[in-house]
Image: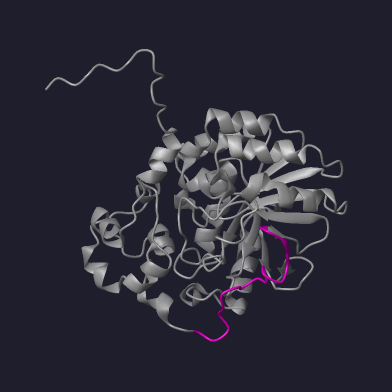
Amino acid sequence: MIPAAPDPRQPAPLAAPRWQQAWRDAVRDPRELLALLGLESLADRVSDEAAAQFPLRVPRGFVGRMRYADARDPLLRQVLPLDDEMQPVAGYGLDAVGDGAARTGTGVIQKYRGRALLVATGSCAINCRYCFRRHFPYSDETAARDGWQEAVDLIRHNDSVEEVLLSGGDPLSLSNSKLAELSDALAGVPHLRRLRIHSRLPVVLPERIDDGLVAWLAGLRWPVTLVIHANHANEFDGTVDAALRRLRDAGVHLLNQAVLLQGVNDDVDALAALSERGFAAGVLPYYLHQLDRVAGAAHFEVDDARAKALHAALAARLSGYLVPRLVREVAGDTGKRPL
């Protein structure tokens, strides 16, 4: 049977944006990930229970930056669900940084004076095993609900808020039109002076930095800072460099925050390489976070004494502007706590 020709009077269906297709093609099976890397022998260390609780998701472009047949690859360690996650550890809980107590409305968190954080979405292109919001109730707490109305109203009626932070999840997982919906609503807030976006997508899914997103960023009325999240120099490649260049060309200020993670970047050579590689891509180091003590992440912790020694060694090696601030977030504090 010959299929009917398409009706020329009907518009052709729109193809999904390239970044959304890459997102859909992400690896979601831990054993498929190990097979792609020639590491099938590690399958007995995978925790199906941990993967069910917090599913694996990793874009194939990020997988391509992992070292083949290297069980100690620092990128693999960040995403592979292991039995270690299911071991209860005292002091590790579901809300490691006090998000719940700082909630002021649906998806709105205000911990520090002058700033309000919007939990824009619960979606991420990659699920990092140390994520401090891995247990966050996203189904009940999403600022984008109902066209951002409650979140924007809260900001409008609080003239102490000069800066809005978009977080998540990952705010750049939202469509360009949804982001524009927010910026249009915020345009009527006279006391808003800055917009900050926290996103891992420029690193793990650089395809997201498309023409529409760049046009939206370039057209915003406020200075924009985008804080990316990379923990190891190997997370950067030519595709990431190109995406970051497009963001800089749109007038966006780029910073990087990393988490100090055992088995990923807990040596001075790795930390120095991260700062230097990021700077080569146009990104200034911002924070080096001590691990947030969220349940399931204890195996990533580096103790404070070692963290301080690593930071001192890094400061002795690099120019000051390449040294991130070593901090911990403590629930109830009025800012990040320097270590």
Q: Give the left or right position of residue 10, taking residue 222 as reference.
A: left
Please say whether residue 124 is one of the residues in the magenta stretch. no
Quarter of the image with the N terminus is top left
328 or 212, which lies in front? Answer: 212
Q: Which residues are magenta?
A: 89-107
- Is 103 located above or below residue 248 in the figure? below
For image coordinates 42% across by 34% down, the residue present is 18
Residue 21 at least partly seen: yes
Check the image and name the residue furthest to the left: 1
Q: Position of residue 64 (x, y in %)?
A: 35, 47
- Extreme residue toward the top, this view: 8
Q: Give the answer, above or below, for where 200 lies relative to 104.
A: above
Camera-nearest residue between 82 and 153 = 153
Residue at horizontal 59 percent and vertical 69 percent from the top? 310
The image shows residue 9, relative to residue 229, as above or below, that is above
Q: Quarter holding the C terminus?
A: bottom right
Q: Is residue 238 visible?
A: no
Q: How is the image coloured?
A: one colour
Residue at the location (51% across, 34% down)?
242
Work out whether residue 190 or residue 146 is closer to the camera in this orientation and state it: 146
Image position of 103 (left or right of 289): right
Query: What percent of the width, then of the height, locates residue 70?
Result: 30, 60
The mark tally for this picture is: 0
Percent of width and height locating residue 307: 60, 72
Q: Main secondary structure of the magenta part?
A: loop
Residue placed furthest toward the bottom = 90
Nearest the eye: 188 or 166: 188
Q: In the image, 304: left or right of 334?
A: left
